[in-house]
Amino acid sequence: VPATVSAPPPGPADFNGASAIMARLPAGQGGFVPPALNSEGVERRGSFVIKRSSPFGPTSMRVYGLPNHRLKCTLRGYRTEQGQYRGATVFTGYKKVWKGKSSFHTGVIPDGGVGEFDLTTCRDLDTGEVQHFRSVPIAPPSYDYPLS
């Protein structure tokens, strides 16, 4: 790569219209239901509970599992394509992993773009339970009022 051209960042390439990492989403019964994390701010699946932060600030989540159990959650970003590639779901390259015991806080999760969603896979490392949570990374509302 010439010095004047920056190399692409390490990791999976983002969708460029010619190649992409096609998403391998977990199979669910009848697909995903609308994510309760966005509409209600909390979602329970199996022994896991995820609470989303306030919609008026940066997005973060608090994950709860069984007492004294080792937990591991992996968040991956995906995008549903439009136009010529309509309906294709691709991995955006965003991935974050958290580990904790009984519960943990994710810290700030960056907002996504149009058509993007996150899939968080949580594992109880003691029992082997695996649950999947879908959420849409949304930016906090803007309060830029015109001055009059």
Image (spheres, rainbow, N blue to C red):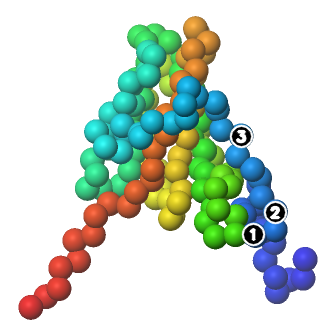
Q: Secondary structure beneath disc 1? A: loop
Q: Quadrant of the C terminus?
A: bottom left
Q: Is residue 101 above or below residue 99?
A: above
Q: Quadrant of the N terminus?
A: bottom right
Q: Nearer the viewer, residue 145 or 1?
A: 145
Residue 56 quadrant: bottom left
Asked if disc 1 and disc 2 are in contact, CB closer than 8 Å, the reply is: yes
The residue at the point 38 percent across, 50 percent down is: 59
Q: Residues within 10 Å of mark 2 (few under 14, many from 20)?
A: few
Q: Amino acid at mark 2?
A: Ser
Residue 83 quadrant: bottom right
Asked if disc 3 and disc 2 are in contact, CB closer than 8 Å, the reply is: no
Label 3, on which residue?
A: 24
- On the image, the x and y values in percent for residue 105 come to 41, 35
Q: Is residue 112 above or below residue 48?
A: below
**Left or right of residue 2: residue 112:** left
Label 2, on which residue?
A: 19
Q: Residues within 10 Å of mark 3 (few under 14, many from 20)?
A: few
Residue at the extreme bottom: 148
Task: Say which label, 3 or 2, has the lower sequence index.
Answer: 2
Q: Residues within 10 Å of mark 1 (few under 14, many from 20)?
A: few
- On the image, the x and y values in percent for residue 73 come to 56, 31
Q: Nearer the viewer, residue 36 or 104?
A: 36
Q: CA distance from mark 1 to mark 2?
A: 6 Å
Q: CA distance from mark 1 to mark 3?
A: 18 Å
Label 1, on which residue?
A: 16
The residue at the point 41 percent across, 40 percent down is: 35
- On the image, the x and y values in percent for residue 117 come to 52, 51
